[in-house]
Amino acid sequence: QVRLVESGGGLVQAGGSLRLSCAASGTIQSIDVMGWYRQDPGKQRELVAQIVTDGRTTYSDSVKGRFSISRDNAKNTVYLQMNSLKPEDTAVYYCHLLVTLIRGPNLSYWGQGTQVTVSS
């Protein structure tokens, strides 16, 4: 019903920048919440940033002032601009959407994950 395609991960040196994108397609009426999570091997998946319909944002303390989340409602796409990257930002990043389907329920969707590696 809904397909998510993530892009933008890669290898970058400490202090560098990356921009992640997550585009959704399918029988979407609205996307109520759009967010980014990350997960290191052996650790729990943690919230990085989240943006809701009215544009309000939430950030984890570890990325405040360095990362910025934004959304393009016309394109059903969420972005994560990551600046001043640190080695501890290395993880697999997943987008997460809470979607209201056309003539359907609210459902949660996860992207396939994209690797971000920050070298020191």
Image (cartoon, rainbow, N blue to C red):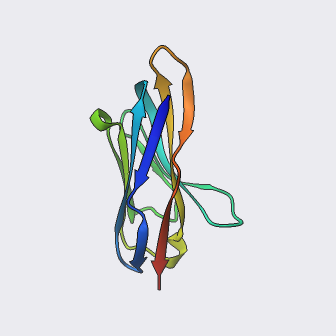
Residue appearing at x 48%, y 24% in the figure: 100
Q: Residue at x 42, y 26 (%)?
A: 28
Q: Is residue 53 above or below residue 9?
A: above
Where is residue 83? Give x, y as percent: 36, 68
Q: Residue furthest left?
A: 74
- Outermost residue, top side: 103
Q: Residue sitting at 44 percent across and 61 percent down?
A: 64
Is 8 on the left or on the right of 109, as rendered?
left
Residue 53 at x, y percent in the picture: 39, 33
How many numbered marks does the figure carry?
0
Which residue is nearer to you in this view: 18 or 83?
18
Q: Residue at x 51, y 47 (%)?
A: 111
State left or right for residue 4 relative to residue 68: right
* Residue 39 on image: x %, y %: 60, 61
Q: Give coordinates of residue 102: x percent, y percent.
A: 44, 18
Residue positioned most to the right:
42
Above/below status of 73 relative to 92: above
Q: Quadrant of residue 52?
A: top left
Q: Foreground residue, 104 or 52?
A: 104
